[in-house]
Structure formats: C-alpha cells, structure tokens
Image: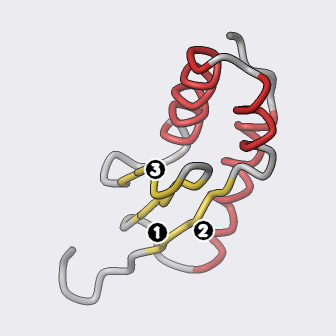
Amino acid sequence: LKPNQNLFGFLITLQDYSEMAAVLSEEVVHQFLVQYKDKILQQVNDNAVLGRVAERSFLLLEPDLFNASQAIGLAQRILEAVSHPFQI
C-alpha cells in the first residue's frame, strides 16, 4: 500500500457451505469453491487479494477503491456474479 491509500476488506461467507459439504463429494465441493473464487476474482482489480480464511469464509482485500460507494458497487457485482448457476 502507498501512504494514504484506501484498503477495503470484504468477508465473504458461504451460508450453506456445511450442508453442501455434508452431502456432496469432496471433489464436487472443491470444484464449486474454485468456481466461486474465480467468479469473485473476475469482479476485482488486479491488485486485489483473495484468500480462504475459514471453512466457509473468504477474505477479499481491495486496495484500488476510493470510497464506500465503490465498495458497495463491488459487493453488489460479486453478489450478482456468484448468484448465477455453477457448472460442475
């Protein structure tokens, strides 16, 4: 980060992850998580960092946003992207 540069953090939690993991194979769950990650990364800038921080949670750090309205717009784009069907 540069001095005075904003850094927005997003905690993204999969609400039904435990139920999904309990009924689907490990390979299917893995494919879902990879596609979920890819859908998020398609919405962010190149400088963003995304990591899995818990069984059902990801942390997204986005340094290239300038204000809260841009952060809200990004959150809305991510929600839209992950709401479409997954091809597994």
> Which residue corresponds to mark 2?
70
The kind of residue on which mark 1 rests is Leu
State the SS at label 2. Answer: helix
| Dots 2, 3 in contact, CB < 8 A | no
The alpha-carbon separation of the residues under discs 2 and 3 comes to: 23 Å
Task: Mark 2 or mark 3: name the one nearer the start of the chain.
Answer: 3
Q: Residue furthest front?
A: 22
State the SS at label 3. Answer: strand
Q: Is residue 82 above or below residue 29?
A: below
> Where's the C terminus, which quadrant?
top right
Q: Is residue 9 above or below residue 48?
A: below
Estimate the x, y position of residue 86 in percent, counting from the top left: 73, 20
The kind of residue on which mark 3 rests is Arg
State the SS at label 1. Answer: loop
> Which residue corresponds to mark 3?
52
- Residue at image x 81%, y 39%? 19
Q: Residues within 10 Å of mark 3 (few under 14, many from 20)?
A: some
> Which residue corresponds to mark 1?
65
| Dots 1, 2 in contact, CB < 8 A | yes
Q: Residues within 10 Å of mark 1 (few under 14, many from 20)?
A: some
The alpha-carbon separation of the residues under discs 1 and 2 comes to: 6 Å
- Residue at image x 62%, y 50%? 56
Estimate the x, y position of residue 72 in percent, counting from the top left: 68, 68
> Where's the N terminus, which quadrant?
bottom left
